[in-house]
Amino acid sequence: MKNLLNGYSRKAGLAPGTIVHIGDRKTERPKITLINYDQDSFEEKVAERIEDCFEQDRKGVTWINVDGIHQIDIIEKLGKHLELHPLVMEDILHTDQRPKIEDYESYIYLVLKMLRYDDIDNDIKAEQVSLVLGRDFVVSFQEVEGDTFNAVRKRLRTSKGRIRSMDASYLAYALMDSIVDNYFVVLERVSEIIETLEDELIQNPVSETLEDIHDLKKEIIYFRKSVWPLREVISGLERTGPPLIADTTQIYLKDIYDHTIRVAESIETYRDIITGVMDLYLSSISNKMNEVMKTLTIIATIFIPLTFVAGVYGMNFEYMPELEWKWGYPAVWIIMIMVSAAMVMYFRNKKWL
Amino acid sequence: MKNLLNGYSRKAGLAPGTIVHIGDRKTERPKITLINYDQDSFEEKVAERIEDCFEQDRKGVTWINVDGIHQIDIIEKLGKHLELHPLVMEDILHTDQRPKIEDYESYIYLVLKMLRYDDIDNDIKAEQVSLVLGRDFVVSFQEVEGDTFNAVRKRLRTSKGRIRSMDASYLAYALMDSIVDNYFVVLERVSEIIETLEDELIQNPVSETLEDIHDLKKEIIYFRKSVWPLREVISGLERTGPPLIADTTQIYLKDIYDHTIRVAESIETYRDIITGVMDLYLSSISNKMNEVMKTLTIIATIFIPLTFVAGVYGMNFEYMPELEWKWGYPAVWIIMIMVSAAMVMYFRNKKWL
Amino acid sequence: MKNLLNGYSRKAGLAPGTIVHIGDRKTERPKITLINYDQDSFEEKVAERIEDCFEQDRKGVTWINVDGIHQIDIIEKLGKHLELHPLVMEDILHTDQRPKIEDYESYIYLVLKMLRYDDIDNDIKAEQVSLVLGRDFVVSFQEVEGDTFNAVRKRLRTSKGRIRSMDASYLAYALMDSIVDNYFVVLERVSEIIETLEDELIQNPVSETLEDIHDLKKEIIYFRKSVWPLREVISGLERTGPPLIADTTQIYLKDIYDHTIRVAESIETYRDIITGVMDLYLSSISNKMNEVMKTLTIIATIFIPLTFVAGVYGMNFEYMPELEWKWGYPAVWIIMIMVSAAMVMYFRNKKWL
Amino acid sequence: MKNLLNGYSRKAGLAPGTIVHIGDRKTERPKITLINYDQDSFEEKVAERIEDCFEQDRKGVTWINVDGIHQIDIIEKLGKHLELHPLVMEDILHTDQRPKIEDYESYIYLVLKMLRYDDIDNDIKAEQVSLVLGRDFVVSFQEVEGDTFNAVRKRLRTSKGRIRSMDASYLAYALMDSIVDNYFVVLERVSEIIETLEDELIQNPVSETLEDIHDLKKEIIYFRKSVWPLREVISGLERTGPPLIADTTQIYLKDIYDHTIRVAESIETYRDIITGVMDLYLSSISNKMNEVMKTLTIIATIFIPLTFVAGVYGMNFEYMPELEWKWGYPAVWIIMIMVSAAMVMYFRNKKWL
Amino acid sequence: MKNLLNGYSRKAGLAPGTIVHIGDRKTERPKITLINYDQDSFEEKVAERIEDCFEQDRKGVTWINVDGIHQIDIIEKLGKHLELHPLVMEDILHTDQRPKIEDYESYIYLVLKMLRYDDIDNDIKAEQVSLVLGRDFVVSFQEVEGDTFNAVRKRLRTSKGRIRSMDASYLAYALMDSIVDNYFVVLERVSEIIETLEDELIQNPVSETLEDIHDLKKEIIYFRKSVWPLREVISGLERTGPPLIADTTQIYLKDIYDHTIRVAESIETYRDIITGVMDLYLSSISNKMNEVMKTLTIIATIFIPLTFVAGVYGMNFEYMPELEWKWGYPAVWIIMIMVSAAMVMYFRNKKWL
């Protein structure tokens, strides 16, 4: 639940645009990577200081990737260099934004959520990724160093695909695409968990299963919250059109939009299914209770009358003629057997046995 | 559940537009059929190699049907010949697209789902059908060889109906129509299954019925997911208008749109009904439990007091005057009969008997 | 359920526009009635053959009513005479269309559902009514001869109201109005059934009630499906405007639209109420179970301890001092009475008694 | 339920625009009040005959209020005088219209519902109010004489507020405002009933409470149905703009719109809360059942084993060594006490005690 | 519940625009604070009388804050001075408005809800804040003196951030921002309560928990009602555009809009989660009942047959051969042990043990 509100309340009372990092503080030093490329050249370096990225005479597309955003001065210097609006800088640092797109004419600011299913805590971990897309540059901010963008880096290095021949908006698309593709990995994990739960339910439902279902439901709600606004983000990006988004990139945005819809739809489907699983659990509990009750009822209704009969002939009245009959005892047994047989037949008839 | 995510996660990290076949790999060799017709002529042949389809001097409408898409080179050659966008080629091969329409000006790319109820696995199998509609050609891609398009082929051969006198957009419509018409077959199967389930429930609900309901629910969710986006596809096609869609075809698209709405509505209706069936199941379980409890209660409340009475006169006190009375034993019997009669009347009164 | 899918699957594979009658085949010969009127004249005749309706020199408004659509040649001839689109003819014959409106410029094609509550089968029977509205004619197709249009006929004959002075679009409106007004009769029947069910539930819920509720729910779902699309049909008709719809008719369409909304809203309300009735049923079952359990618990918890006490003094130990006490037996009775009194007080306290 | 369908079915078959009064027939003679005012003058009289209201030479705003609409000739004469459309006259008389607005250019026709919570029948009574707003007159039709408009009358008489200086549209607004303000009184009554129900539930839920909840739910559904369409009515009125609605009145319509939204939202809230109350009821029933079962289980599981032990030593075998032991009887007691103590500890451990 | 309807019904019958204070009457004297600032100067004073605020020769932005609105004459004088519409003055005093925005061209009137979680009453307290934004002034009305605006005051005094260099619309934004930021504090409190409830449920669900859930649900419904309309308010403010809203402020409004969406989404999420918690409660009750029943069933089904056996050999028939057997008694014990062992194995098999 904590990730739903991440420190917003801590910020109440501060001036808007105040640059404060809100989020888990990671201790490692931020890592700044600079990649500059065009169709023919490719240059990659790790910047010691953020100022190293500010040389003006570069051609082609520049991609500055910042892993770790807790060192405010780096963001501030970069923000001033790129003339970012104070609210953008605030949002980059405040790591629990809703996915959104903001068009500041000279650049576009994008917030996305990078998701990961944590098998140890059994929940979905989210990391905020901010992208600033300018005419010839993309700046990306990640909370920690991750490997999601590695595939893009590799394609740039090896010049595989069309990425090197495209402009900055295609790079931004490629980064978003790698984030969205990652959602499918999370989805698959969720799908597996649901299947495991279903199997458990059918085999042996225990009350822990219930809590697992409840937890999974909450994770799916959180997942949905991270993905749902993305649809607007991407269709907002599509609408932005020129000059920042190249025509050739537009068609790719449509593709990523389709993927987002697919993820959103699958989440809805899982919500429906998990509700069904809950129902299944509840009715399997009912079923078991029913069976328990039936067992009790059958045993009790057969033996209670018999016990009564036995009780009757255990009475100590002086004048009980049956007691002295020679065949009294066998007769009682016969009566008792007949009574139970009748009971059993009654239950058979009712399909309880 | 697997069909909800089909291999998307496997693709994470690949460059967009990478042509990889994702889906079940079928071992048969793809079969390429070429049909060329106009009002007067009709030519049909099975192409050995895809290049056989590339002759340029054909008149009329050309329909290339590819059954089996796992042989990437065929798709690649065809794609290059038709100048398809790399994303289109990726989507043709990646067999778990959402139904969609993409207008690339010189051609329209359509994805549909062909559905089939599999009576052995008791689920709905989906197959992706891609259609590429150009000015004078239609290319259709199916995952396996099927018989859904046979009716169209036959109408072309026999020149039955108006199909031979119409243009390529009408052919595309005819193919889509045969797919949508097929949904009704699946719907009917679903309808039968629901009726069977209802009958089972009323006659003898067992816990397996519950799992059947849950499975059917999931199938309907999946069905819905395949059909729902089709509405946008077809209305998107209607909007496209000239030049690719002939005016005469427009009116037929409206008809297919109506059918899609009907399918979608029926699916919604089945969702509602299946929810009702679930409720029916749960309350029939409650009902049965109630009856079980009543039986136990009636038997127990009648005999427990009687057993107590018998127990009292089974005590071994030396001074128990009743035991020595001559009519003690019959008196006890009379008391016991009266007590049970009172109980039975009480239950009658409460309508438990 | 059958009426949800009526033969669509039977048609899969046929060419679109193939004129096949799908629906229950009624054996009577179709009956064709021709009415021609203007403000001053009125002519009514039953046509032996459809050709009798094709005279060209009529003035005023012509209304051709066809009861029974299973004789395809009649529809075909009429269709050719009026130059109807093949899809329209297909839809007239295929009696499970969704209510819809199609504007073919020279005429408007309307599909409506005429509903009737069948008290014997306890379900809602639907009949498809097709209307073709041209500049100076209305053709109506009914599946069987019915009396819904009689009121319109009578108003035409007696020149009551403004119908004779209005044009064809007003006649079409009058026919639709009589169909929609009929929905209220069905609604009232549904309302009565719900009230009966509620009374049954409060007095004596049995498990048959549950099936009745489930059936009614399905009927309401089906009712809704027939009425819901009508809203679009009528607002579509309103939008069509001139030339086919006279300005004076427009205002009446608004009225019929209001009625449709009212029907649709009432159906929604009944859905809500029937859900409430279901809940009422379930909780009255729970309530009864609770009462059953209470009865059992009270009887058992009072007598089980007493039976134990009796059992103790029924033991045959040689050294049981109590057995030889003079007041042992009365003392046991006093103890037992006190125990039960305490129990009763405990239950009183808990408000179980 | 009756008020959901009020006589619509009775009208099926009549010509549209037929002037028939449908609704409860009240026996009192209709009362017609005529008020004429401008900033300086104010005239009020009770008209004996409707013709008394037809003098043409009045200045300022004229308000004709008709209490009781069952005398058709009055409505007919008034309708003819004001040149109302036959459908409007039909709607005035047919007292179960949906709230609506109809703009006939020279006048606007409004239907509203006046609501009242009837404490004797414990339901919401609705009365239809029709308003006809012309350039310089307002005609209002009520089913019975009521006091809702008294406040408006008083403000007119005493010239309190700005009403005397405004035009007819402001008068119409004032009448609507007094109706909408009245909804809050009904809402408050509903709120009180819900609170009473909640208190009852927490203290002592009985099955009558359930029926009360069900009835209240139906009342809220009906309330909602009366208020919901009002939003469209008022925003329709806002859109109408000049010439009939004065600019100065527009801003007041916004205010009444806000109130309507507030009522609609509160109704939704009550729906949510009443659903919650239902859940509360169901779970409090479950809770009570649970407690009942626990009591039974604790008593039974403690005494059943003890009774068994007593039963064992009540057996009449000749060779039962324990029976002859001197300390046999006390030993059995000790065993029995230990068994029950163990049981009690077990239940304590399980938190059942 | 009371806060849902706050005195609306009390007002029924009054003329619209009547200036009456509706809300809890607080006894303290209203406190009027006047702040006047521009980039270089800052002046703050507490006004004794409202007339002190009416000097005309001020430059820069003027902020008049009124804490306590129950003294009608103050509001009236201020309203006349600023030429506020009577409806605005009515709304300021009537403290249960829906959040809304009204554009009166020369000024904008805004209503917001300031929320606070009251830990003693365990509910959300709301206070109405009215803002009147003119070209160079902001007037804010609060029901009681609060500290929410202190942060804004401090920023003004210390000239921290950009607030002193901005215009009146930025000040209005800053005030709204401090209110919206405060919602996150309430959200966090709600989140904590839900977590506490979940923990309670898993450890030891008692029936009080149920009432807590029900109360929390109602609080969330109320919370939602206060926040939901805010979205329209702020987007309405964004649309207003020039002249009252400076371009530089627009971008900040977007930021506040994002926050509002986030709050609204979180509330929806909590609604979903609380529904899940309710389900969890109900099924944990079911689970416990199941366990109770199992215990009873196991004990009863083991001992009832044994007691029967003991009962049989407690009968006093004269001819019961077993009684005289030497090994009769041990044999009975063996039988009884075997029966119970069989029972235990049966339950093991069923996984009940």
Image (tube, coloured by chain):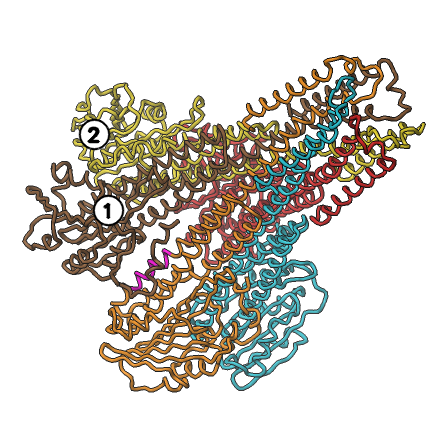
Chain colours: A cyan, B orange, C brown, D yellow, E red
Position of C239 relative to C323 (above/below): below
Tell me if residue B330 is in the magenta stretch. Answer: no
Return the mark for residue E75. Answer: none
Residue linked to disc 1: C144
Q: Quadrant of the N terminus of chain D?
A: top left
The residue that appears at 26% across and 21% down in the rendered structure is D31
Q: Chain of mark 1?
A: C
In the rendered view, does C11 fall on the left or right side of D320?
left
The residue that appears at 45% across and 78% down in the rendered structure is B86
**Which percent across, then down, holds residue E283?**
63, 43
Position of D237 relative to B86 (above/below): above
Which stretch appears magenta?
B251-262
Q: Are dots 2 and 1 in contact, CB under 8 Å?
A: no
In the rendered view, does E16 fall on the left or right side of A1?
left
* Mark 2 vs mark 1, CA separation in Å: 61 Å
Q: Nearer the viewer, residue A80 or E220?
A: E220
Residue linked to disc 2: D59
Q: Nearer the viewer, residue E298 or E3?
A: E298
Tell me if residue B255 is in the magenta stretch. Answer: yes
Say which amino acid is labelled 2.
Lys
